[in-house]
Image (cartoon, rainbow, N blue to C red):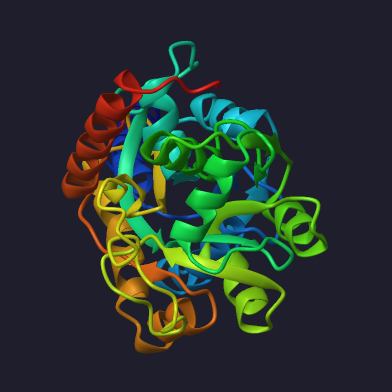
Amino acid sequence: MQNLKLSRRALLISSAALFMRPLRAQTFPSRPIRIIVGFGPGGTTDVIARSYGQLMSEQLNVSVIVDNKPGGNQINAIRTLLNSPPDGYTLYAATGSSLVQNPAIKKDLIYDPLKDFSYIGLAAKNPGVIFCNQKLPVNTLNDLVTYAAANPGQLNYASAGVGTSGHFAGEAFLHATGVKITHIPYKADAEVIREVMGGAIDMSIMTTLNTTQAIKSGKIKALAVCTASRLPYLPDVPTLRESGFNNLDVLDPYTFISLVGPAGISAATQNQLNAAMNKAATSVAFAAKIRDTLYTEPMRSSPASFREFTEKQISVWQKLAKSMTLPV
């Protein structure tokens, strides 16, 4: 009888444990979430990821940590993501270049953005600006094109590296205008700005986050913004269309930042993370910070609409790639 009571008690304990186990597994999040960034600290992607991470931490009641893994044209970061379990605790701050442009143009990538990622949400749209150093004898985008045409191969432009948004934007500009300008790759946005201000680099195309203060202080000359309308913080800088360049709509958005995870994250976890992102984007204080200090437009999406947006962007760049040769 004693053994029978013990057996019944053991059976009850085992049954309770079986029922409790799924409930415990469904609790998300229960530990810190990591956002992998494929660039060093201080750049556009890093700043946006940290800003979102702070507010998402408040929404989810866990720490959200940014883990910088620069190098390899973001491949180091992507490889880390792909080797992570699809549990929602490891995310990647995907940019336009890693999610759209590289997959649309390069043939030897280690990933397929439409198969290897779980889509969480769009975070921000980064307007681009075409600018040059103060020594260059041009004041408008038309001036630049005319000057470059008269001096083929004599000018250079810089980006934060081969295969980055700045590189793709520069090559799209050259293709649309027909001018010959040499690409000089660097390792970070800050290096590019410094070299343009110093006069070693003639021009570049970068985000407003990286350029607005230098433009306002007169250290570089803004020639055009890559947006449909003028920007409130750069009201005197014309758009591409105002400058007569109607064939460069591919540069709007110049780039974007988003969050993805490894393929296989459950829909419930995707939606929970997406809700935290969208809640951050609707914060008045956060939106003001994004626009007024980061010169970036916050975005909202569902996981499904984010994936649809990505598919359309890849299609646009694939069509462009067929008509031009990119040295990537």
Q: Is residue 212 above or below residue 21?
A: below
Residue at 50% x, 59% y: name it: 143
Please report the residue visible at 32 percent of the width from the left and 54 percent of the height from the top. 252
Where does the image place residue 300, in percent across and percent down from the top left?
26, 63
Q: Is residue 137 left or right of residue 246?
A: right
Eyeballing the image, is 49 above or below 289?
above
Measuring from the top left, give residue 65's x and y in whole percent: 61, 57
Q: Left or right: 283 with respect to 63?
A: left
Q: Please name whichever residue, 23 or 52, is drawn nearer the observer in this view of the structure.
A: 52
Is residue 159 at all visible to an observer of this figure?
no
Residue 124 x, y percent position in the rendering:
39, 62
**Residue depicted at 39% across the width and 42% down the height:** 260
Looking at the image, which residue sits at the far front?
Answer: 150
Question: Who's the residue at 35% across and 40% down the image?
Answer: 21
- The answer to which of 82 and 220 lies nearer the viewer is 220
Report x, y in % for residue 57. Answer: 49, 68
Quadrant in the picture for the N terminus: top left
Quadrant where the image shows the C terminus = top right
Q: Is residue 242 left or right of residue 325?
A: left
